[in-house]
Every structure is written in C-alpha cells, then in structure tokens.
Amino acid sequence: MPRVRVLLLNAALGPLDYRGDAEPGSVVVVPLGPRQEMGVAWEAERLPANEIDEARLRPLLQVLDSPPLPAPLRRLIEWTSDYYLAPLGAVLRMALPSTSALGGARIVTEYRPTGLVPDRMTPQREQALERIVGRQGLVGELAAAAGVSDAVVRGLVKTGAIEAVEVSTDHPYPRPDPDFHVPVLEAAQAEAAEALRASVRERAFQPFLLDGVTGSGKTEVYFEAIAEALRQGRQTLVLLPEIALTEPFLQRFTGRFGCEPVAWHSGLRQSQRRRAWRAIAEGEARVVVGARSALFLPYPNLGLIAVDEAHETSFKQEDGVHYHARDVAVMRAKLEEVPVILASATPAIESRHQVTLGVYKELKLPERFGGAEMPAIEPLNLVSDPPPRGRWLAPRLVEELQGNLEAGEQSLLFLNRRGYAPLTLCRHCGHRFQCPNCTAWMVEHRFTARLACHHCGHVMPVPRMCPECHEEESLVACGPGVERIADEVAALFPEARTAVVTSDTIWSPAKAAEFVARMESGEVDIVIGTQLVTKGYHFPNLTLVGVIDADLGLSGGDLRAAERTFQQIRQVSGRAGRGEKPGRVFIQSHDPDAPVIDALVRGDVEGFYEAETDARREAAMPPFGRLAAIIVSSEKEADAKEAAARIGRAAPSVDNMIVLGPAPAALAMLRGRHRLRLLVHASRSIPLQDILRDWLGGVEWPKSVRVAVDVDPYSFL
Ligand code: ADP
Ligand code: ZN
C-alpha cells in the first residue's frame, strides 16, 4: 500500500506517515486526532519518522491542486531548520499562506465603502466609516481596520454604506518589460551591470557584493540584472529591509519596467495575498519585492535574488524562527543555483569578509551618479559648544538650518529615538515610569498623549499627578526623542513645514508614499526622523543633514555598536546632496575624537573597516568566531532561573567553545516573562549546531519555561 510522509505546519509535531499517494512538495490535508491539518508531502528518506504499522495508517484526506513546493525550497526549509535550530513545521509555515489562500473558490467577496451615509448613525458607525475610507477587504479586515466589531460592519452593509464586490483572485499580473526604459549607464555602472547580466545568463550560484557609495546608482545597476532574468523568462526576488521602502521602490521599478512588480508584505489583504501566492507558485509573478517573509515563497523558476540595503540588521528576525534573511537568501541562491546580489553603501563586515575569502565577487561603484559630490561632514562638539539648557540643537546647526530654509532647500534631522522623551520622572519624588511587563522605561508620546513601552506595546495615558507622591504637574521629560526635536524646530522656525518620520507615523506603504509625495513636491522643509529615513530615499533638494546624537548607539557592549553607528551615519549622510546641489552633514557628539566619528568625518571607510575587522579577529568574534545565545524565559522567575541553571550545568566541555552565563538578560523582563541568557562563543571549526542540539536535547524544563536559541545573534538584549 502506498504511504506518504507528511510534514505538518504544526511546529510541535514531527513528520507523520499517511496512507495515500502524493508527489513530494504537494500540499495535503490530513487527519490528526479529530482535526484536519495542512501539511506538505516530503521525501521519506530525508525526514526520519516513527515507524507506524501499515494497519494503523490513516488516509490522506486531500491533495490540493496548488503547485507543489519545489525541491530547492524543501532543501532550504531543511537547512534553515537545521542551522537555526528551529522546528521544521515553523519554517514550513513561512512558505505557505493561510489555508483559505490555497483551496476553495477563486472568487472572493470583499467589501468597500460606497460614500452613502446611513439613515441611522451611531458613534461606532461613524468611527468605522471614518477609518475605512479608501479601503477594501473582508468583513473582518475592515472591522479590524476600523476598530469595531464585525457586526457593525455587517450592519453598514445592510444600510448600503458598504457594498460587496466580487474579486477574482486569479486575474493575471502585468509582465514587466525589460526594454521599457533602458538607462544609459556610466562606465563603472555598465561594467558592474555586465558582470551581473553574464552571471544571470550563466545560471550558476554566485554571490555579488554590490558596494557603491550612496547615490551611485546601485538600484539602476541591479535593475539590469533583473532585466536579464526577465529576458530569460525567469523570476527575480528583491528583498527590502522595511516595507516603508516598498513604495519608492515600486515607483522606480515602474519607471524602468513599465509596471509594478508583485509586492509581498504583511499589509496585504487576504485576497491579495492569495493572488500573489498563486502567481508566485505558478511562475507568473516575474518580479517579487518583499520583506524577509518573501524569502520562503515557492518560486518554481527563480533566476536571481537581490538583497537591497543588505547591511540592515532588520533582516534578522528576532522572534519565532530566529533567522537572518540575508544569509538565508545566499543559501537559497546556492540551492537554486542562481546569482544573488547584496547591495549596500555600507556592507557588513561579514559580507566584506566573504569577499576577502573569494566567495563573494565585489562590484564597486566608487562615485555618485551624474557627478554629484559626496557631502562634506563636520563634527559639532557638544561639550565646547553645547545647545542652550533644555535644547538639543547646537548653535551652529541652528544657523545652518536657518540658512537652508532661506535658500529654499530641505533639511533632515536624524535621531534614532521614537516619541517625545525616553524617560519621564517626577521632579518631586524622583519616581520613574517603568513598564509593568518589561525592564524598560515608558516613553512619552505627545502626539497620542500617552506613555508607551517600545518592547511590549503597553500604553497608558500621561497622568496629571505622580502615582507615587501624588504631587500634581510634577512630571518632567528627560532627554529628547524625535517629537521633542520637532517641538524645538517649531519653536525656532515657526514658519518651517516639518515632517516627523518614524514607525509611528509611517506604518504602511501608503503612508510612506504620502511622505515621499510631500517631499518631492517641496511641501516639507525639515524632516525629523529615526533610522527609517536613513536609507533608500532620494530627494535631490535635501542638502543638509544634522545628526542629533552620534553617541547614542555607541554605549552598551554590543559587538556591532561601532559598525552600526558608522553605517547609520554614513547612510543618513548619504541622503544629503544627491542632486545638483552639494550636501553638508553635521554630527553632534560629546566625543568627536572617537574613532568612529573621526573616520566618518575624514571619509576613511577602508581605515574604519580595517580597524574593526582587526578587532573582531583578535577577539575571535564573528565572522572569525561564532556566537549563539540561549534565552530562557518564564512568567515564573524561579522556574526561569532554575531551568537556566540546569542548562548551564549541562553545558558540554568542548575545546574552542566557552559558555558565558546564565545571567539575567539586559531586558531581564520582557512582556511579563523573566529572562536569562547564556552566550556560547565558539571557533568556526566546531559543529556548533550539533553540540547545541545534543546539549539542549538532554535537559528538561517545566512547561512554563521557553528556551529560544539564537544562532548568530544580532541583538544582545
Ligand atoms: P543608490 O541606490 O546607489 O543610492 P540610486 O540607484 O538610488 O543610488 O541612484 C541615485 C539616483 O541617480 C537615482 O535617482 C537614479 O535614478 C539616478 N541614476 C543612477 N544611475 C543612473 C543612470 N545611469 N541614468 C539615469 N539616472 C541614474
Ligand atoms: Zn513593556
């Protein structure tokens, strides 16, 4: 009797055998106890399972008609699970959309507002109609967007204020045209583009590090590789670090190829997700742009992967499966036997090291496109020339902003801190507002008049009186966030038009598009933003950049603190002077002689990387050595401590490996869970994953405890 091994989407279960027949990769529905579960048929020889008697095998219920997951993707899922010590089912889940997207009708009913006002208006109906302007989606999606119950939305459908629309989830996407608008490339661009095109034609694995200064035309260059993949009839995946960057990307892509690529991100409606997934799985979607999650989709005919802003640490996923999308992208390219392009103006030390080893090919674009100059960078010493008390902009920066306003040019102030102030305290008794669930201060947000925890999302209204000593009007904000800088700018330049750009204001591609349009039409004079504005954007009239606090990222013992500061400030500097007018950058610092600041000011990229790389080599830190973190957490402090201690005691003694901890994590409490960390530091020569698996496999802990392994960690909280 035929039997088939099935990997279920359920992370808690291993592979199971069923009676029936299905090609490896087929999406199937199987019985599990009284329930039905979705899974994927797998090669039995690759996934060991418990032998089950022929007689006890239950039958497959259904083989879905969606395309099977291709073999290279199945190998990628195995690799990811193995490398990052994640359950196979959890990795598999990233490759499949929801069940409803796979089977069922090809026509779905969605709803949208008609503009009619219902005869009977209630506050809830009013709120719903206000918030769903221009939206369309399932009843549940609209209800969620409006913050009301499904019943309210259904009620509005009855009144005619919302109407039903039939949406076909299968109508085809337009095909990008590789010859729609071919740019004339400069010499260095043309050379890099040719190397990429040749590699696409060759159809072999080859990673490229496309290392070009900001504004050098990296995007134009990798677009040529995409054009080649299109001519070959193959698919391309472009990974971006943030969905906020999707919108400018879509615009540029349309300019080059005549239509938009297929976008994949968390903001898609269910019908859009279904349509995109099927088009991808059938090979119809030729170019897909997305965040990390687009990496595990079932492209049957991949010809190229591009990772833009490849140095960005947001490619590292910090919950669920802890994987690094950049590294998994390279592995996928290897399994698919296609080239992969890592584009960056500030490559990670890890990526540069791969060039040194001869694994990655380096393509350099040393100059800005069209003869634009790199901006001049000047440090501003906050010790010798501080801002007035209670202010954060140094006198010189204020002068420069004034001059830029008068010249009708745009400016950008960068501070990587959301909200108004990072800490609020009572000036009477010293009480500080701490999150009840996390080891973190509550951050004041004046726009919403709330205190918010940036780790768990806990919010509370800003109280009028101190909860400790009951003194009224005694709360003071300590330190600046972007909102406070915006206040200062408004006080200094009441006539200036400002925009605050953070994840609080730009939380969807549509919001990003709005911001881009305002910048381009010159409706904004001064942008105040977090790391969200440091990358990707191209505003030719933006000529002045001020870094409010260059020291911010340097405190704390993070392995990559200096590298990240260097990257961030170089990126944000790269927003200045991208057009015909030259740019100027001012960096405020208490320690302008610090090596990072000095390297930035002198533009000494090679010197900086060399010093950092040497330091990493000395300390045997990545990429020369390896790290893995083990995070033990529980709502019960004693359980967490006890489990962490047990794991610590069970640590194997292995040459070239040391285990630090357990110790309370920097975020000793997060979302109500007490956390301890162990950090494993090992040489590259030992099989770290096997050791971790054996080690953790031999320790038991109570159900209340969660143990997460973070291989190649980027966050040390
Ligand atoms: P990077 O990604 O390296 O920062 P971009 O690709 O954004 O640089 O290019 C900077 C600007 O120069 C963009 O507006 C881009 O359209 C333009 N550009 C670059 N190369 C060319 C070219 N060969 N022809 C026309 N415009 C170009
Ligand atoms: Zn919290």
Image (cartoon, grey):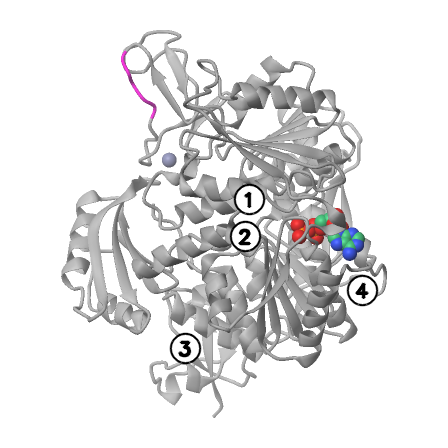
Counting from the top left corner in percent of width and height, residue 12 is at: 37, 65
Quadrant in the rendering for residue 472: top left
Label 4, label 1: how many angstroms apart (C-alpha)? 36 Å
- Label 4 or label 3, whichever lies nearer to me, is 4
Left or right relative to 614: residue 577: right
- Label 2 or label 4, whichever lies nearer to me, is 2
Callout 3 amino acid: Leu
Residue 701 among those drawn in magenta: no
Callout 2 amino acid: Thr
In this view, which residue lies farthest toward the left? 649
**In the rendered view, would you say 152 is above or below 620?**
above
Callout 1 amino acid: Arg
**In the rendered view, would you say 443 is above or below 686?**
above
- Per the image, label 4 sits on a secondary structure element best described as loop
- The answer as to whether callout 2 falls within 8 Å of ligand 1 is no
Magenta highlight range? 429-433
The numbered mark, 4 or 3, whose residue comes first in the sequence reads 3
Left or right relative to 364: residue 40: left
- Per the image, label 3 sits on a secondary structure element best described as strand
Residue, disc 4: 175
Quadrant in the rendering for residue 22: bottom right
The numbered mark, 2 or 4, whose residue comes first in the sequence reads 4
Residue, disc 3: 16
Label 2, label 3: how many angstroms apart (C-alpha)? 46 Å
Residue, disc 1: 570
Residue, disc 2: 346
Q: Which of 414 and 65 is in front in this view?
A: 414
